[in-house]
Image (cartoon, rainbow, N blue to C red):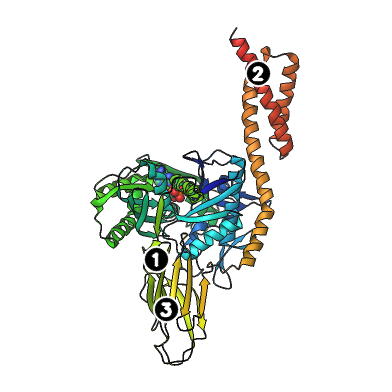
Amino acid sequence: MAKNIGIDLGTTNSCISYLEGRDALIVPNPEGARVIPSVLAQTHDKKRIFGNAAKRQMITNSKNTIWGIKRLIGRKFNSPEIKEIGKRVGYDIVEAENGDIKIKLAEKLYSTEEISGMFLTYLKNIAENYLGEAIGDTVITVPAFFNDAQRQATKVAGEIAGLNVTRIINEPTAALISYGQKIKKNGLYAVYDLGGGTFDISIVEVNGDIYKVVSTLGDTFLGGSDFDAQVCDWIFHEVERESTVDLRDSKDIVQRVIQIAEKAKIELSFDQETLISIPYLHHFSDGSNYHFQKKLTRPQLESFTMDFIDRSVDLIKSSLGDINVKPEQIERIILVGGQSRMPVIYQKLSEYFGKPPDIQINPEEAVAQGAALQAEIIKGKVRDLLLLDVTPLSLGVETKGDTFTKIIERNATIPTKKTMVFTTITDNQTTVKIQVLQGERATASGNKSLGFFNLVGIPQTLKGIPQIDVTFEIDANGIVRASAQDKATGLTQSMKIQPSSGLSPEEIETIIQDAQKYEEKDKMELRLTRDKLQLKEEWETVKFYYQRYIEKLSPHDSAEIDALITRTEKALEGKDVELLETLLNKMKSYRIMINSILTAEFSK
Ligand code: AMP
């Protein structure tokens, strides 16, 4: 039997969940961590590593360590924010011929979908390894405010990883699904989701088993890493003041400082002040060294980052304004995303809503748990919560004079299908170009183009006579289809919006095959890590008992165990999985044997 899983594919961290009975449980990584850093790297000896292992070596291998990919996926190279991100990350972001983003990893260029796909393959392997069975269906979450291109790209990344992605759902909705059991009262619930890279606010109307997202707004460039960047700026500013050197151009140093800044920021959620120490930050040409050491206080951090928090509150105001709801009408406020743990955010939201936010759910795990529940809801294995999501952005077409004519308004419940009638603008016009746009600007050029198609073969006649039905459809994943039909002839043309990377199905197939090539290798790595950890644990336990109670063992057993301890110590340095597993079995049986000798001994 295959297990269905939910994946919260985060900017900073990711989390996997599955259902056991009615409980959504978390899949830990081989080191036992419940959230997994969304980082991958290629090491100097050409090994692909992921998660914590990749994060740990980020400073010394910043050029080939990819993090924050979620901020890039489904975007074009010339988006204004990409330049800013380029300054912060150690790897190279380059422009593909068609304006897409390519990432350089070990001198090879990859699309963002491929990178994300590699990481999802790693998550899939972790889940398979842990659950001991193949993965069935997968639900992946995305920020509610992700546009069509970003959703499509996430789905493609899942396909590259060989996952059967049955649904892409919004993170805040997922959080609410996992919170569901605690909902006793109908009403409006606000989900405030501030993760590593993105912010979403969603207002959800709960009516029995029906969860309807009635408003959603967000900012895909507002998250914990912006908070870290502020602390980083402060550190560099202080360094410059004290030592007159500007270290902002050294990518390796920036990576090192970012990690320290994040740690300090998190500490300030628990303490009023923290000491930031960075020894040997700079070596002067005269041989002396510069060590950074400074105290950072919680009020300082708050003042650096208050603009971000205010921006999030402004978005809440707009989303409530969109549906004419006052803050006090909100039943409960649910916090999601690691950055929402910052105490001043709790205070600000308490003031704004007139009641404290709920902190009953784990903000880092709730989204994955909701996704796992959704995977089972789709399968019909769990009581059907009717999940009515909304589209975060309006969809429409370009009409005369660079006008954006909306066909589906933002906040429309999805799945949805809407048709509008258009006509020709010149006499004898036989072709109509349907330019599909997504966004909120009044001008067509101000919005994001999802692509275009032509309806050809309209019979010649006077302008304004033909009647052309343009239909837009958004499925439950938030993915768009568009079609046009000439009413007189029945002539139809349609398009499924291609992912922004423009990857063709053939290209996706090649990427999938490439990913499969790595799959075996990655699985082996995971097996090695898991075996080593288990063996080390057994080895430490047996060694402990052996040294303490050697006199209680027979000379034969004692010699055997002694030899085994030495062999294991050596094997732990190597990579021979078979040997590790043989030793693990032996170690286990010796531990059981020692245990029974000691139990018998002590019960005498
Ligand atoms: P997520 O994407 O939900 O895993 O959120 C990750 C972000 O939350 C990162 O920017 C973390 O630095 C941040 N974060 C995690 N724990 C805390 C905390 N206790 N206080 C402030 N920020 C935190």
* Image x and y of residue 4, in percent: 55, 47
Q: Locate residue 317: give its quadrant.
A: bottom left
- Vertically, is 160 above or below 95? above
Which numbered disc, 2 or 1, marks the residue that appears first in the sequence? 1
Under mark 3, the amino acid is Glu
Say left or right for 225 vs 331. Answer: right
- Vertically, is 320 above or below 129? below
Of badges 2 and 1, the one in the foreground is 1
Under mark 1, the amino acid is Leu
Counting the numbered discs, the total is: 3
* Image x and y of residue 499, in percent: 53, 66
Element on which disc 1 rests: loop
Say left or right for 524 vs 25. Answer: right
Q: Residues within 10 Å of mark 1 (few under 14, many from 20)?
A: many
The C terminus lies in which quarter of the figure? Answer: top right
Q: Residues within 10 Å of mark 2 (few under 14, many from 20)?
A: many
Which numbered disc, 3 or 1, marks the residue that appears first in the sequence? 1
Please name the residue that numbered disc 1 is placed on.
Answer: 393
Residue shown at the point (34%, 48%) measured from the top left: 208
Whole-angstrom CA distance, mark 2 to mark 1, is 65 Å
Q: Residues within 10 Å of mark 3 (few under 14, many from 20)?
A: many
Please name the residue that numbered disc 2 is placed on.
Answer: 594
Q: Are marks 2 and 1 in contact (CB under 8 Å)?
A: no
Please name the residue that numbered disc 3 is placed on.
Answer: 398
* Residue closer to the observer: 383 or 186: 383
